[in-house]
Image (cartoon, coloured by chain):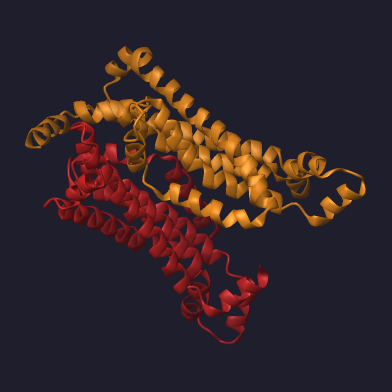
Amino acid sequence: MSNLALLLQDVLEEPKLIDWEWIRENFWEDIVPAFQGHIFLSFVSVAIALLIALPVGVFSARFRKVYPPVTFVTGILYSIPSLALFAILISIPGVAIGPAPVIIALVAYSLLILIRNTVAGIDSVPPETIDAARGMGLTNRQILFRVELPLALPIIVAGIRIATVTIIGIATIGAYINGGGLGVLIFDGINRQFPTMIIAGAVLATAMAIVADVLLLGLERYLRPWARARRT
Amino acid sequence: MLSKILEVYARPDFPEKLREHVVLSLVALLVAVAIAMPVALLIRNTRLGAAIAINIGNVGRAVPSLAILALALPLLGIGFASALVALTALAIPPILINASTGLREVNKDVINAARGMGLSGGQILTRIQLPIAAPVIFAGIRTSAVQTVASATLATFIGAGGLGDLIVEGLQRRGPEILLAGAISVAILAIITEVGFGALERAFTPKGLKIAQKRGS
């Protein structure tokens, strides 16, 4: 510990926090792969989480009794600190350190948000609209796919937005169990007492989250044509 | 396995790590409330203030907690103080955003009615706005509290102790029982925080509001 403190003092006495030389030299070797790895982790996790959350959400909206237990279980998953969840996952026999447990944990974190928003989206469809669709002779299945889900889509996308931003942040911690991504830069920076790497990882992860947030907000607005029409 | 995990809890350093974790989280949360609430009160009647609060909240949500903790290392050094600053910075946005929207969304008619009854600005704040906004404010504090307990696990990476120490020790020494002991205790602490602050939230919801909510649903 005292060694670490001494090293840190050296770092602090050195005035430059960002070593541009290092960034230039290691851009293609370290920074770009970490960035790509981070996109991969986040994207795959949100995609898998959606594949689970959409059917569960639709089912919970139909059969109201299953909704409280579903939110209870996913709520507990959501409140387990990420480092703890990673640790629990890799101590299961057969689960090795690497991207797999990271993706499992990230999926677990997204479920609550995605399921909740799917149910809220379906609930937001006015009953008159469904009556009208039924009056037009649509079957239950057609009502779900042609009326309820399209109308619920903006709220579902709002959920995807929150989940994606959350996951991009948590994915950085996955590097601790060899999941890759921008966390690699942050942890290496901590271990080597090299602020440039910490800052590179932190800034890129934040930028990625903000860009994802803005893009998905744009999609959400685009999917709400009625809201745009009302505003103009 | 279970008995091995229990052995870890019997270790003399476990209460110390638990204490570090709780103190770090609690102090960060209290400082965050002490900063965010006055700011929310100051900006409650300005449109610009609301925009600022929401933007701080959004950016705060986008910055990974590991990033803030790791950045505190080169800027503030190793140990408890820098972890405290980082965790406080993380805890402010949810409280600020909820307190500011909660106060703003108090029905204008209610405030006008109170003004008509002759209440002063201060009375409107303490008797009308704060009680009505209380559930939303406490929801923000709860979000912050759970997030702070979770992020305090990462304090171990910058030498600030806490239960994260056990997880790191377990991973480095390949001691799954140490790792699990740390993970389980952190998870339980987070769930207790969630449930406890949820109860606080309900306790501070005014009776009239509860009746209105029931009728509404």
Depicted B183 relative to depicted A31: above or below? below
Q: Residue at x 31, y 26 (%)?
A: A185
Residue closer to the observer: B88 or A128: A128
Q: Is residue B128 left or right of residue B72?
A: right
Depicted A208 relative to depicted B59: above or below? above
Residue A195 % position (x, y): 25, 29
Which residue occupies the extreme right position in the image? A136
Q: Residue at x 28, y 59 (%)?
A: B26
Q: Does residue A155 appear anywhere in the picture?
A: no
Q: Is residue A117 left or right of residue A101?
A: right
Name the image quarter holding residue A202. Answer: top left
Which residue occupies the extreme bottom position in the image? B117
Q: How many marks?
A: 0
Residue closer to the observer: B142 or B92: B142
Q: Does residue A68 appear anywhere in the picture?
A: yes
- What color does chain A have in the rendering? orange
Q: Is residue B140 left or right of residue A55?
A: left
Q: Residue at x 33, y 63 (%)?
A: B34
Name the image quarter holding residue A5. Answer: top left
- What color does chain B have in the rendering? red
For the N terminus of chain A, the image quarter is top left
Residue A92 % position (x, y): 35, 35
Q: Residue at x 45, y 31 (%)?
A: A103
Residue B200 % position (x, y): 42, 69
Residue closer to the observer: B184 or B209: B184
Residue B69 % position (x, y): 29, 41
Residue closer to the observer: A156 or B123: A156
